[in-house]
Image (cartoon, coloured by chain):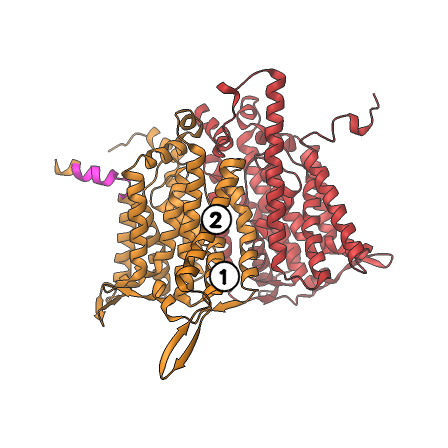
Chain colours: A red, B orange
Amino acid sequence: MNLPLWRTGRLTDPRTLPLLITLALFIAMFAYGSLAYRGFFSLQVFLNLFIDNAFLLIVAIGMTFVVISGGIDLSVGGLVALTTMISATLAQNHHWPIWIVIPLVLALGALFGAFQGVLIQYFRLQPFIVTLGGLFLTRGLCFLVNIESITITDPAYTQLSEFRVHLGEYAITTNVLIAAVAFAAAIWLAHFRPFGRYVYAIGGNEKSALLMGLPVARTKVLVYTLSGFCAALGGVTFTFYMLSGYGLHAQGMELDAIAATVIGGTLLTGGVGYLTGTLFGVLILGVIQTLITFDGTLSSWWTRIVIGALLCVFCVMQRLLEKHTTGRQKHRSDITPVSGGRRETTPATAATARTGTLDQLA
Amino acid sequence: MNTSRLAAMARHPLALPLIALIVLLVVNRAFNATFFHIESKDGHLFGSLIDILNRASPLALVALGMTPVIATRGVDVSVGAVVAICAAVAAVLIGGQMHVENGVEVYVSNVPMPLAILAALAVGLICGLWNGTLVSVVGMQPIIATLILMVAGRGIAQLLTSGQIITIYYQPYFFLGAGYLFGLPFSLFIVAAVLLLLWLLTQRTALGLFITAIGINPVASYFAGVKARAITLWVFGFCGLTAAMAGLMISSNVKSADGNNAGLLMELDAILAVTLGGTSLGGGKFSLIGTVIGALIIQTLTYTTWSLGVPPEANLVVKAVVVFIVCVTQSDQLRQWLVRKPLEA
């Protein structure tokens, strides 16, 4: 049964199609840059994408899990800033050793994520409002710790920040190594552990997951814990990248992380998504920035506009694919869920289907 | 008889926000003896209370626009960006210069002021309708649909102002955000007008019923013949319009437009104000007066932290704690737990 790839139907599978489009878009953008600007087509430019976006990739990994489970986490940018702030204060002003500071901030991030997860799961609160409160809280706490920016001169931090792995004439930083390990661990967690299955199952249909006897409550709390942990790890790498702690660091990073996740083909309604897609989503955001830097005439605000436009295109595409698949399933099984066969397109429908079910069960 | 009426009053949905507001005001009075003083200078009223009312106006406007959106089970996180865009449009169109001709100060704007204001309002409406289209026609989740404009909006605002903070030199425009009418700040009249319009539309026509119906069950309301799509579209459009008004008010008050910082985090404050006022985030229940009270609570809270000498940044922490408390007390889960344990006197 060795069918060629284009006949297996995988190319048009709505689960993998956005991923392929993302991949093609990345290649096209990189190719365009290579043709348009001198010096763009080099391995170092490609590696710089990872160096400059390692922290975003780590944060986006956590976000991908949350979005696949059907939720959203808006607190990650604030948590990154808080991590840089706590790390800088402890390492710089109180001279704590790095091997205490880093585990401590990672634990704090995970704990904060767990707190949000508990609120969302056990009080049945909407993820976006809880994590919005989390964003307020983390940013506010940053400024309570210190209003100024703290520069880090601690030798352990500067050494790790300046550490390079040389690959011939090219080099990568500590952050890239951390991101690579985090990415590998996330793939293992998502595809080779029961936890990953549970997350996909909950995102697909929480009611079914519950009826199947899956540990829904535990998994959902763990998903937000993981996201908090990833944000803290992103904060640690961001500290290495900037060598400072500041309450205004990583502003709007939650939006970048969501954008990278969505552009990577993860469905915002949950249940569908790949970490590889998120990787390319992050790379696309990086390429946009690199293109604008290479161009030199375009102003920085075009980054936001282009990301917004891409986000829009991918969201509309998701909706069209969703309609297409539901239409196909309807045709196949010959069941029309609502009379007249016309699907109600009010956006809240999807949300109802997810949030309403548990209350009915309880 | 009297106690039962008191109990009924305590159960009124507006009781809790009102009590919160009164407690905050009393706390302020305890720290500042002149807090309730209102004096009249040149026929204008001055005082802490007037100041709070005036400063709460832009937030109250945005929150009023947000209330029907949340009542239809939506949310609009792009309002902060829309505020920035509309402020930028107005600032760029008005700009303005002051000449002194024959000893008389003459103010010249780039474009006639009414035209500039109309343009800014139109841009706000278009932003809102764009969100509404994505939600009701394309069928996206509201938070995602409005996230797009939230991401791109600040970029667009900076594009309009070329990344600069645009200063406005046109005296008549300042009336909008800092002027006085009948001794009261003019911004209060705008908020009152919007509140009255919304109240008439939702209480004196069937629109309020339709909005709650969509919030309770979109599918059922659709089959009951409610034009869910059109209503959702225009509810978002209206939200954009109120954000534009707030943008005009803010830019007129600070006499400039800053694409990066105008209306920053305003979406969060607006959602918080709406929630504080007793509007359910799950949709299907809303209170316009409650929203205004919510906006006043937030502004009083800000005022309190300032007057207590706490760093203004701590405000964020206080707001976050309020969000968590309000959400948890609103949740049905908590009520179930409380009800399960019968009261033992």
What amino acid does circle 1 point to? Answer: Asn
Query: Where residue B197 sits in the image (x, y, percent)?
Result: 30, 46
Sequence-wise first label, 2 or 1:
2
Report the residue that reaches farthest toward the bottom.
B102
Answer with the quarter of the image where residue A323 lies: top right
A197 and A263: which is toward the camera: A263
For label 2, the SS is helix
What residue is disc 1 on?
Answer: B261
B313 and B79: which is toward the camera: B79
A248 and A152: which is toward the camera: A248
Q: Is residue B6 magenta?
A: yes
Q: Chain of mark 2?
A: B
Q: Residue at x 36, y 63 (%)?
A: B177
Query: Where residue A270 sits in the image (x, y, percent)?
Result: 58, 34
Q: Residue at x 72, y 60 (%)?
A: A160
Q: Is residue A70 magenta?
A: no
Report the residue that reaches farthest toward the top.
A334
Mark yes or no: residue A252 visible. yes
Residues rendered magenta in the picture? B5-14
> In front: mark 2 or mark 1?
2
Q: Chain of mark 1?
A: B
Which mark is on residue A118?
none
What amino acid does circle 2 point to? Answer: Ile
Q: Residues within 10 Å of mark 2 (few under 14, many from 20)?
A: some
Q: CA distance from mark 2 to mark 1?
A: 21 Å
What residue is disc 2 on?
Answer: B126
